[in-house]
Amino acid sequence: MPERGPFVRRYRVPLIVVSLVVLYCAVLFASAFDVGFGTQRQSPPDASRESTEIAVAVQQIQPEVQTVAVTVTLVPGKALLDERGRLRDAVVIALNPDTTPGDIVFPAGHHPSTLSTNVATDGDLARWPFDQYVSQPLTVDVWRETATGREPIAATAQISNAIYGWDVSQTATPDSAATTGFRYTITLTRAPSTLAYDLMLVAILVALPALGLFVAITTVRGRRPFLAPLTGWFAIMLFAEVQLRNALPSAPPPGSWVDRSVMIWALIGLVAAMTMYIVAWWRHYETQAT
């Protein structure tokens, strides 16, 4: 029976390669899962429907200012349309609270359309990539403008996700004061594929200084010969660390936990590795001089 040491040494490289391939396949699977199931597309309007529906689609998130851009699509019932499929009366939709002044108005005599607005959220980008954003309880009210004033319209609201890379969930709470009958709380979290990609970048930030320290320590101890071109390799890795930090998706603000833990380790580790390798270079120079 072969000993454990020789077995590990023989299959070390294949095991590392297989592990990387499995990790890459897992990221691809998570990405495919997000594309297939992470977004919910709106169904096309049905001109023969009796009830009115308000389709709210989450289109974009801006973590820096904690707002979510949404589109509001009016899918009116037959009673609101004339024989040409246009609105008989102006329809007013109010999302409360939102960050856009005024209500959303669909004018009379026009076909139903899609308009945009913004909704405020509460979250903390400094917790990247485990940050999540939650909206305040959101009401969707619908009225029609008539000669005698506004008349409420009984309608339903449908909230969907149109952002790739994010998971959007909703919680509906009954509210008799709203024409749609509910208050909606929208929660956004990063999708599994996005989270895996972010964590892989963080792992690379951690691995680069670890590799540099391994090479430097091995060389200083005399177990490996000094190679002058590797001095430039350390400088390239130091430059790559900064570029990787700037390439983080939805990059967290300066001073977040990534900087306080990962980046500090990466920069100190690489500088220490470069210092030790310069010491090895000096010893190598002295050896050649003698």
Image: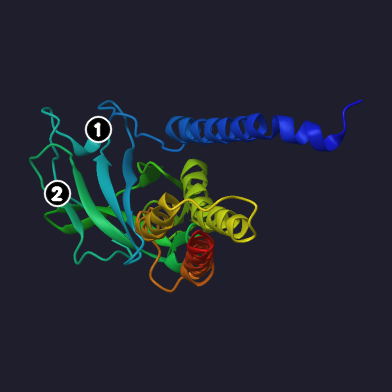
Q: Earlier in the sequence, mark 2 or mark 1?
A: 1
Quarter of the image that includes the N terminus: top right
Give above or below for 232 relative to 55: below
Residue 216 found in image quarter: bottom right
Give above or below for 28 relative to 258: above
Residue at horizontal 31 percent and vertical 40 percent from the top: 52
Residue at horizontal 19 percent and vertical 48 percent from the top: 115
Residue at horizontal 22 percent and vertical 51 percent from the top: 116
Say which of 194 and 122 sits in front: 194
Residue at horizontal 62 percent and vertical 30 percent from the top: 18
**Residue lying farthest left?**
109
Say which of 92 and 1 sits in front: 1
**Residue lying farthest front?**
290
Left of 46 or right of it: where is 121? Answer: right
Q: Amino acid at mark 2?
A: Ala
Residue that badge 2 annotates: 90
Say which of 47 and 275 sits in front: 275
**Residue lying farthest right?**
1
Q: Are the residues flagged by discs 2 and 1 in contact, CB closer than 8 Å?
A: no
